[in-house]
Image (spheres, coloured by chain):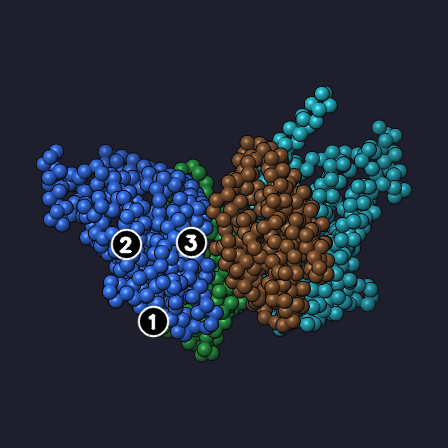
Chain colours: A blue, B green, C brown, D cyan
C-alpha cells in the first residue's frame, strides 16, 4: 500500500499521467469522477440554451455552424462520460445524479439566450472562459481526462472563433438593431462569464488539494485574470463596452483591474435559483424519461441478437 | 431551365425541411449517441439543401441566394413532399420518417449522380454517400425497435403505419429532363430496401390506402405553416441584415 | 405623456400575451365547460389589450394602431411582465397563472378605474369587472384541484410553486403619474386574496426566493421569442395588407 | 302501448314537438341520439381546423372574431350534448364513442386549413352549407333539438357573414397574395362543401324514415341544390370562380346545374382516410385523456363538498 501510494506520488511529481489501471488514492478517484462528471453534465445541459436557436437561425450558414457546434457538445459529453467510466463510474448513474440534482453543471447555462447575438456572445465569452479553464486541464494528471481535454479544447477554440466572427459581422456589417442586440447580450453575459471561474481563491477550499494532485494547474483568480486580460482587447476590436466602469489597465500589475463580482448571485444560481435552472432540468429529465423505452428496446434487441449468435456458435 | 429550377427547389426543400425537423431533436434525443447521430443527419440534410438551393438560385439568375430561397418564400412556393413536414412524434416516428425518406433519397441521388448535368450530378454524388449512412442508421433502429420490447414493437409498427400514406408522393411523376429519370421507377428498388428492413424488424409492410399528395405543387400540411414561421421569423424580422 | 404611453403598453402587453397563452387551450381543455370559460377569459384579455394598445397608439400620435403595436414590435419593445409568457403547462399551471395574474389585475384595474385620466379610467372600469370573473373562475379551480385528489393536490401545489417567482415583478415600481398608484401598495391586498384561496385549497403560500424581473424593461424569457414568432408571422409575411 | 304509439304519431302528424317526458319509439330515440351526438361531435372537432389559426390571426380584430366563433362552437357542442342527454344518453359515453371511432363527425373537418383565407372560406361555404342543413332542423320534431338549433342557426349565420366579410376584405381591399389565397381556398373547399349534404338521395337509405318522423324536412339533394343556388351569386360578388366548369344557370329548372360529385372521395374520407382524420382524432383523444385527472379532481372535490354540507345539515 505504501508502495502504491509512493508510486502514485512519484507519477504526479514527475508530471507523468495516472492511467485507469494504476492504483490511485480514493480521494483522487472521487475528485476526478466528480470533476469529469460535472464537466460532462455541463456539456449536455449547455446544448439547450444555444440549441433552441438552431431551428430559428437567421441564415442557413449560421444554422449549419450552430448545429455542428451543438453536435460537438454532445460529443464532448460522450468522451467525458467515457473518461469517467475508466474510473469505475457508470454513465446511467451519473445521468441520474444530474437529473436528481445531486451533481451540478456549470451555472452559466442557467441564464437565458434571448436573441441570436447571444449565440455569438456565448461563443466568444462563455467558450472563451471555458478554454481558459480547460487549456491547463490538457496537462491534468489523469490521462484519459487530459486526452479528452486536448480534443475538446481544439474544438472549443474553433467555436470561440466562430462566435466572435458572428459578432464581428453583426457589429461591423450589421444593422443598428443587430448592434443593439450584441451590446445587450454582452451586458447580460459579461458578469456570469467571470463567475465561471468559480469562487475567489480565498473561498475555494478544494483548490489546494486539486493543485497538489495536479488535477488543477492554476487558481480560479489567476484564470479569471487571464480571461479578462485576453477579452478586453477583443471587446475593443468589436466596438462593444464591457459593463464594468472599474475595468481599466493597471500598468503596475501588468493586468486589467476590474470591479467586484456579486458572489451572492453566483451562490443563488448555483443553489438552483437562476432564471432557467428549472427549465434546463425539466428538459433534460424529459429527454431521459421519454427515451427510456428506446434504450430498453435497444438492450432487449441486443440480448436477442447475442442469444442468436451464441446459439449459432453452439450449432 | 424552369423545369430544372423547379426540380432543384424540390430536392432542396425536401432536404431543408427534413433537416429542420431532424434538428428539433437537439437536447431531446433518447441517448447521447443519438444526439450525435441525429445532428449528423441534420447537418447532411442541411448541406444538401444549401447545395441544391444555391444552384437553383444561380440558375434562376434573379439574385436569390440560398437564404432568399429558404427564408423569403411563402408556404405555397415550397416544393417539398409532405412527408418531411410530419411532426417528429416519438423516436419511432422519426426513425420511420428517416428510413422511408432516406431509402428514397439514396436511390434518387445515386441515379442523379449519373445525370448528364454535371453540377446536379456532383451534388448528388456527395449526397448519395451521406444518405447511405442515413439508411443504415434508420435501418438499425427500425430493427432494434421492431424486434425489441413489445412496447417498442407496437410503437415502431404504428410509426410505419402513420408515415406510410406520405410515401406515395415520392414516386409521383416529377422530374426535370436533366434528371433523366422517372421517379416511379424508383418505387420497386425502394420497396426492396424497405421490405428487407421491415422483415428483419418483424414488421409487416402497411397496406396502401389514402395517399398524401400536393407538396410538389405547393400544397402542404397543416404542420408546415408553423414550421416555416419558426424557421423564417428571425430572418424576416431583420430584412436585409447580414449574419 | 411618454410615461403614460409606456404604462399603457405594459397594461396592453400583459393582457395581450395572457390572451395569446389562454387561447392556446383551444380544443385542448379538460372539458367543454372549460373550453367555453377559457375562451371567454382569452376574449376579455384580448379586448383589454386592444383598448390599451389603441389608446397608446393614439397618444403616441405616430400612426401606430393596435395591430402595428401588437405585430410589428420586436421582443425587447414589449413591456409585459414575464409571468404572462410562461408556457401553459398542465391545467393546474394555467389555473395558477390565471389566479395570480387576475387577482393582481383586478386590484389594479379597480384602482385605475378611479384615475383622473378619463380614458384610462374608462378602460379599467370595464376590465375590472371582467377580471373579477377571472379571479372567481381561477379560485374555484384552485380549490377543486388543491382539495381534489392527491394527484391534483400535488399538481396544483407544484404549479403555484412554479409560477410564484414570477409574481414579484407585478409589484415593482412602475407606473405613470396619471395612474396615481404605487404597485407595491397592491401587494398586501393581493396577498390577502391569494392567501384566502390557497388556504381553502389546502395549499401553503410558497416561500419568496428568486424573483423574475426585467419584463417592464423589455427583458423577457426564452419562451417569449417563439410566442411572438407564432403570433406575428402571418401579419409580418404580408406587410401592409388589410384583413 | 298502441295508445302511446298513436299519441306519438299524432304529435308528429300535427307538427307538434316530441318532448323528453313523452313516449317515443325506440328507433326514433336511437336515431335522434345518433344524429344529435354526431352533430355535437362535429362542433367539437370543428373547433380544431379553425382554432389552430387563433394564435396566428393577422390582426387583433380577426383574432377576437375567430376566438369568439370557436367559443360558440364549444357552446353548441355543449347544448347538443345536453339535448342528447334529455334522451337518456350520457355525455361521457358519447365522447368515448367519438374517441374510439364508433360515432362519426362531419367529414368536412378532415380537410386541412392552410391559410387565413381558409378561415373565411370555412365561414362562407362550410357554415353556409351547415345553415342550409340546419335551418329546417329548427322545425325538427324533437323539442330540445329544435330549440338548440334555433340558437345555433342564429349564431352560425353570424359566423357565415363574418367569414364572407373577411373574404370581401381580402378580395376587394387586399394584396394580390391575399386574393391568390382566397382563390386557392375556394378551390379546395368547394367540392367538400357540396358533400356536406350527404350522399345523393338514391343512395341515402335513412332519409325516408327521418322525413316520416319529421327529424329531417328535405332530402340531401334538395338542400344541396339550395346551397348551390344561394352561393353562386355570392361567389360572383366576391369575384371568385367556383372550380366547376359545368356550373351554370338552367332557366328551365330554375336552378343551377353543376358537375358530378366524386362520391368515392366522400366515402374514403368518411371511412377514415382523409388528410386530417388521424390528426383530429389524436388531438381530441389527447385533450380527453390529459383532462381526466382534472375531471376526477372536480368530482372528488364535489363529493367532499357535499359530504361537508350533509354534515352541516345533520349538525
Residue sitting at the far front: A252
Q: Indicate the position of residue A34 as horizontal and vertical percent values.
A: 28, 42
Can residue A7 be seen from the camera position used here? yes
In the image, farthest residue toward the left? A3
In the picture of the structure, the residue carrying the numbered disc 2 is A221
Please give the chain letter of the residue carrying mark 3: A
Are discs 1 and 3 located on one and the same chain?
A: yes
One can see residue B132 in this view? no
Lower position in the chain sequence, tag 1 or tag 3? 3
The answer to which image quadrant residue D29 occupies is top right
Inter-mark Cα distance, 1 to 3: 26 Å
**Residue D50 location, x and y as percent?**
64, 55
Residue C130 locus on image (x, y percent): 70, 50
Query: Do circles 2 and 3 both sit on a common chain?
Result: yes
Residue at x 42%, y 41% (from the top left corner): A289
The chain ID associated with circle 1 is: A
Circle 1 residues within 10 Å: few <14, some 14–19, many ≥20: few
Image: C190 above or below D56: above
Residue D281 is marked as none
Vertical comparison of C24 with D117: above or below = above
Residue behind mark 1: A237
Q: Is there a contact, CB below 8 Å, between mark 2 and mark 3?
A: no
Residue that mark 3 sits on: A111
Q: Residue at x 56, y 65 (%)?
A: C73
Which of the two discs, 1 and 2, labels the residue nearer the N terminus?
A: 2
Amino acid at each position: 500500500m505504501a508502495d502504491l501510494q509512493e508510486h502514485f506520488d512519484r507519477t504526479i511529481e514527475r508530471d507523468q499521467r495516472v492511467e485507469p489501471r494504476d492504483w490511485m488514492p480514493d480521494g483522487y478517484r472521487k475528485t476526478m469522477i466528480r470533476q469529469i462528471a460535472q464537466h460532462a453534465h455541463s456539456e449536455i445541459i449547455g446544448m439547450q440554451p444555444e440549441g433552441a436557436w438552431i431551428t430559428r437561425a437567421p441564415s442557413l450558414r449560421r444554422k449549419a455552424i450552430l448545429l455542428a457546434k451543438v453536435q460537438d457538445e454532445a460529443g464532448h459529453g460522450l468522451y467525458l462520460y467515457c473518461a469517467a467510466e475508466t474510473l469505475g463510474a457508470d454513465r446511467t448513474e451519473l445521468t441520474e445524479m444530474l437529473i436528481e440534482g445531486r451533481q451540478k453543471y456549470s451555472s452559466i447555462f442557467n441564464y437565458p439566450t434571448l436573441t441570436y447575438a447571444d449565440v455569438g456572445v456565448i461563443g466568444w465569452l462563455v467558450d472563451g472562459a471555458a478554454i481558459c479553464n480547460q487549456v491547463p486541464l490538457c496537462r491534468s494528471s489523469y490521462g484519459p481526462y487530459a486526452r479528452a481535454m486536448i480534443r475538446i479544447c481544439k474544438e472549443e477554440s474553433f467555436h470561440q472563433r466562430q462566435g466572435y466572427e458572428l459578432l464581428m459581422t453583426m457589429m461591423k456589417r450589421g444593422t443598428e438593431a443587430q448592434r443593439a442586440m450584441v451590446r445587450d447580450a454582452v451586458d447580460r453575459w459579461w458578469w456570469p462569464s467571470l463567475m465561471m471561474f468559480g469562487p475567489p481563491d480565498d473561498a475555494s477550499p478544494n483548490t489546494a488539494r486539486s493543485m497538489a494532485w495536479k488535477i488543477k494547474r492554476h487558481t480560479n483568480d489567476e484564470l479569471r485574470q487571464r480571461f479578462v486580460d485576453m477579452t478586453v482587447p477583443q471587446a475593443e476590436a468589436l466596438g462593444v463596452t464591457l459593463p464594468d466602469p472599474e475595468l481599466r489597465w493597471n500598468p503596475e500589475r501588468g493586468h486589467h483591474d476590474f470591479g467586484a463580482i456579486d458572489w451572492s448571485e453566483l451562490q443563488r444560481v448555483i443553489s438552483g435559483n437562476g432564471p432557467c435552472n428549472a427549465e434546463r432540468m425539466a428538459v433534460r429529465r424529459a429527454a431521459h424519461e421519454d427515451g427510456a423505452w428506446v434504450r430498453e428496446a435497444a438492450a432487449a434487441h441486443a440480448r436477442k441478437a447475442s442469444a442468436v449468435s451464441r446459439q449459432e456458435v453452439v450449432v | 431551365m424552369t423545369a430544372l429550377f423547379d426540380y432543384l427547389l424540390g430536392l432542396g426543400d425536401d432536404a431543408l425541411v427534413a433537416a429542420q425537423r431532424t434538428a428539433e431533436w437537439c437536447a431531446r434525443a433518447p441517448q447521447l449517441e443519438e444526439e450525435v447521430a441525429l445532428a449528423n443527419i441534420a447537418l447532411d440534410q442541411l448541406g444538401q439543401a444549401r447545395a441544391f438551393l444555391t444552384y437553383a438560385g444561380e440558375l434562376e439568375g434573379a439574385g436569390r441566394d440560398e437564404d432568399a430561397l429558404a427564408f423569403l418564400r411563402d408556404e405555397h412556393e415550397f416544393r417539398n413532399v409532405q412527408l418531411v413536414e410530419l411532426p417528429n412524434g416519438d423516436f419511432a416516428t422519426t426513425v420511420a420518417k428517416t428510413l422511408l425518406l432516406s431509402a428514397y433519397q439514396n436511390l434518387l441521388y445515386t441515379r442523379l449522380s449519373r445525370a448528364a448535368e454535371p453540377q446536379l450530378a456532383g451534388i448528388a454524388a456527395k449526397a448519395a454517400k451521406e444518405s447511405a449512412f442515413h439508411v443504415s442508421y434508420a435501418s438499425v433502429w427500425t430493427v432494434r425497435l421492431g424486434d425489441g420490447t413489445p412496447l417498442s414493437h407496437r410503437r415502431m409498427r404504428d410509426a410505419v403505419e402513420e408515415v406510410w400514406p406520405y410515401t406515395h408522393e415520392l414516386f409521383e411523376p416529377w422530374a426535370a429532363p436533366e434528371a433523366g429519370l422517372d421517379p416511379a421507377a424508383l418505387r420497386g428498388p425502394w420497396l426492396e430496401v424497405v421490405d428487407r428492413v421491415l422483415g428483419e424488424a418483424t414488421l409487416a409492410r402497411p397496406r396502401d390506402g389514402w395517399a398524401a399528395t400536393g407538396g410538389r405543387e405547393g400544397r402542404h400540411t397543416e404542420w408546415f405553416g408553423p414550421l416555416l414561421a419558426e424557421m423564417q421569423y428571425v430572418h424576416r424580422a431583420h430584412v436585409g441584415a447580414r449574419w
